[in-house]
């Protein structure tokens, strides 16, 4: 069984925050209770899978909820979890799951059954609920329950990537909710008291400060190795790293608060270890194609040429990344094709030629939004400086998470940096940002782009892998030509971990680290 993001110099407020974190949380020889402290960018926006896209929330959701299938964080192997087995019909449209018996919902809401699976898919599919994942869920025609422990999911059309909609990661259709709890609590109550089947349950949320989860005493599987996890909102990388060094923080990762430059500074610190993994994590600058002059593809192409990707990776990522790709799909994904999806090229002269050809009056003024952590602020400043070379003056605006999620989807926002981790199947990446069904407020197609809609539908229903790969190649070529977004990098996952942490196996996908496996040495 089983994610986002400034200065290296600590200001007065940051020093006070660190001093608060550094106060002892334990007395005596060992911690009572055993508490793991994890540095997180923010406290997130929702603890109901249907209503959030943030990495902070995904990290916590994966501790509280479970899915029919789970993905191994190291091998990406998918195995039954809340299901004990499953079969797929010859036509690929009917998926039948045998459910695990004896799994109890947290907080006394009874036994997990097929009714919960059916309820979860209906929640995502119903347009009145405004699930972020409605586009991913609409492929399901219906879920039926021949008996309490059998769930039959019938698809409208066969889809080779559907298995990734059933696992414990975003898109969040896989995490199962309790029908009985929802019937009693409603959305507002469920938000305050989320009910899952997982090894941890929510204890408290203090917005802007921390989220605390505690061990589920009635968990059906092996009990978690620690009693409590305190996810502390720490957006400053130096503060998070100093916390790991002192023992006030146990884990800081590049999917949350840690930036690569800080990670390198602390990698040889006694009592601290640095973990590095290749990943499916990327950041890209989405450009609103309805805002002038960015509605002209030549302007967007010029912006892509204006960025020094190797310099960006050297100065901001400390080499822990490779340059972004023109066609957006990441290396290692199903159907990746470098012939139509090459690395982005830095060519200022070409950028200026394109702007001249477009007849753009310079300078162009505007802004773009980004996350308020160290790495993203530093990268945004680098990008702003790069674009200014060609007369495009875009102010970088780092925003706190709650403000960011509102500002970046406004129709007047010219551009926004989006950071995400994805699965090896490209469907999630495309459905997150690049089809018209997810134009805000429905989703994160901040570019308001519709250029691959037909190709997306075709790859969704392709009868064979070879057919799907053909459509995926065309999608990469189309994205490379149209430039609704500029991919900055494909980054490595990094974590600074205090030596007292044992059995930490991080995930590099868009879900949560399996923190139930973690144990702590006596402090």
Image: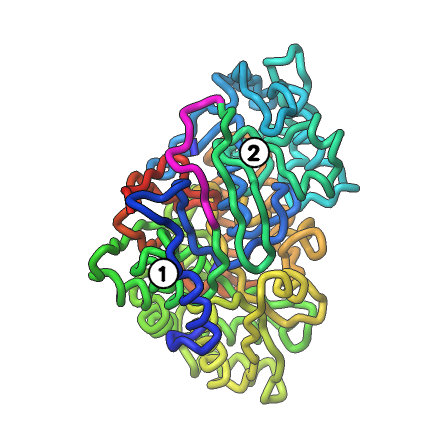
Q: Inspect the magenta stretch and tell me whether residue 387 lies in it.
A: no
User: In the rendered structure, which segment of residues is drawn in magenta?
Assistant: 220-230
Residue at 30% x, 39% y is 503
**Near-viewer residue (134 or 35):** 35
In this rendering, does residue 162 appear at all? no
On screen, residue 421 versus residue 52, left or right, reads left
If you read the primary sequence from the N terminus, does the residue marked by circle 1 or circle 2 appear first? 2
Task: Label the magenta part by its dominant secondary structure.
Answer: loop
Where does residue 504 sit, x and y in percent of width and height?
33, 42
Mark 2 surroundings within 10 Å by alpha-carbon count, few (fewer than 14), some (14 through 19), many (20 or more): many
Residue extending furthest top? 147
Question: Are circles 1 and 2 on residues that touch, CB within 8 Å?
Answer: no
For marks 1 and 2, give the one nearer the viewer. Answer: 1
**Near-viewer residue (66 or 345):** 66
Mark 1 surroundings within 10 Å by alpha-carbon count, few (fewer than 14), some (14 through 19), many (20 or more): many
On screen, residue 153 versus residue 318, left or right, reads right
Where does residue 402 sit, x and y in percent of width and height?
63, 61
**Near-viewer residue (352 or 44):** 44
In this rendering, does residue 132 appear at all? yes
- The residue carrying mark 2 is 174
Where does residue 416 sit, x and y in percent of width and height?
58, 67
Mark 1–mark 2 Cα distance, whole angstroms, equals 34 Å
The label on residue 243 is 1
Where does residue 50 sit, x and y in percent of width and height?
65, 42
On screen, residue 11 versus residue 152, left or right, reads left
What secondary structure is marked by label 2? loop
What secondary structure is marked by label 1? helix
Q: Is residue 514 above or below residue 23?
A: above
């Amino acid at each position: 069984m089983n994610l986002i993001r400034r200065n290296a110099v600590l200001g007065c407020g940051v020093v006070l925050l660190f001093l608060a974190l550094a106060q002892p949380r334990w007395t005596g020889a060992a911690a009572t209770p055993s508490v793991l402290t994890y540095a997180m960018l923010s406290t997130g926006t929702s603890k109901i899978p249907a209503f959030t896209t943030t990495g902070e929330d995904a990290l916590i959701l994966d501790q509280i909820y479970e899915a029919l299938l789970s993905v191994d964080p190291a091998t990406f192997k998918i195995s039954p979890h809340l299901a004990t087995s499953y079969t797929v019909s010859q036509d690929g449209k009917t998926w039948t799951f045998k459910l695990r018996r004896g799994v109890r919902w947290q907080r006394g809401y009874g036994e997990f059954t097929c009714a919960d699976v059916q309820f979860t898919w209906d929640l995502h599919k119903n347009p009145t609920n405004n699930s972020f994942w409605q586009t991913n869920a609409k492929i399901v025609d219906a879920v039926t329950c021949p008996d309490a422990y059998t769930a039959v999911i019938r698809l409208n059309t066969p889809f080779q990537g559907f298995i990734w909609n059933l696992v414990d990661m975003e898109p969040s259709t896989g995490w199962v909710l309790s029908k009985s709890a929802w019937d009693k609590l409603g959305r507002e109550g469920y938000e305050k008291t989320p009910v899952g089947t997982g090894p941890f349950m929510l204890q408290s949320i203090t917005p802007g400060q921390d989220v605390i989860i505690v061990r589920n005493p009635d968990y059906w599987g092996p009990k978690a190795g620690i009693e409590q996890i305190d996810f502390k909102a720490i957006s400053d990388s130096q503060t998070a790293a100093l916390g790991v060094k002192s023992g006030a923080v146990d884990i800081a990762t590049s999917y949350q608060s840690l930036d690569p430059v800080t990670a390198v500074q602390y990698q040889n610190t006694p009592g601290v270890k640095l973990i590095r993994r290749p990943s499916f994590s990327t950041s890209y600058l989405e450009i609103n194609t309805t805002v002038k002059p960015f509605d002209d593809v030549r302007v967007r192409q010029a912006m892509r040429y204006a960025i020094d990707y190797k310099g960006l990776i050297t100065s901001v990522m400390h080499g822990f990344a490779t340059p972004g790709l023109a066609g957006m799909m990441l290396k290692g994904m199903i159907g990746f094709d470098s012939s139509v999806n090459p690395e982005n090229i830095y060519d200022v002269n070409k950028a200026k030629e394109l702007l001249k050809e477009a007849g753009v009056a310079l300078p162009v003024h505007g802004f773009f939004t980004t996350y308020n952590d160290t790495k993203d602020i530093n990268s945004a400043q680098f990008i702003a400086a790069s674009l200014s070379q060609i007369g495009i003056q875009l102010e970088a605006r780092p925003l706190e998470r709650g403000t960011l999620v509102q500002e970046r989807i406004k129709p007047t926002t010219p551009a926004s940096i989006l950071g995400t981790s994805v699965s090896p199947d490209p469907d999630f990446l495309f459905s997150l940002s690049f089809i018209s069904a997810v134009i805000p407020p429905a989703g994160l197609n901040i570019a308001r782009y519709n250029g691959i809609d037909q190709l997306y539908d075709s790859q969704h229903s392709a009868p064979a892998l070879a057919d799907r790969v053909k459509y995926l190649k065309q999608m990469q070529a189309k994205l490379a030509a149209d430039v609704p977004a500029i991919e900055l990098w494909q980054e490595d996952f990094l974590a600074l971990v205090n030596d007292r942490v044992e059995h930490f196996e991080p995930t590099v996908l868009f879900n949560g680290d399996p923190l139930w496996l973690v144990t702590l040495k006596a402090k």
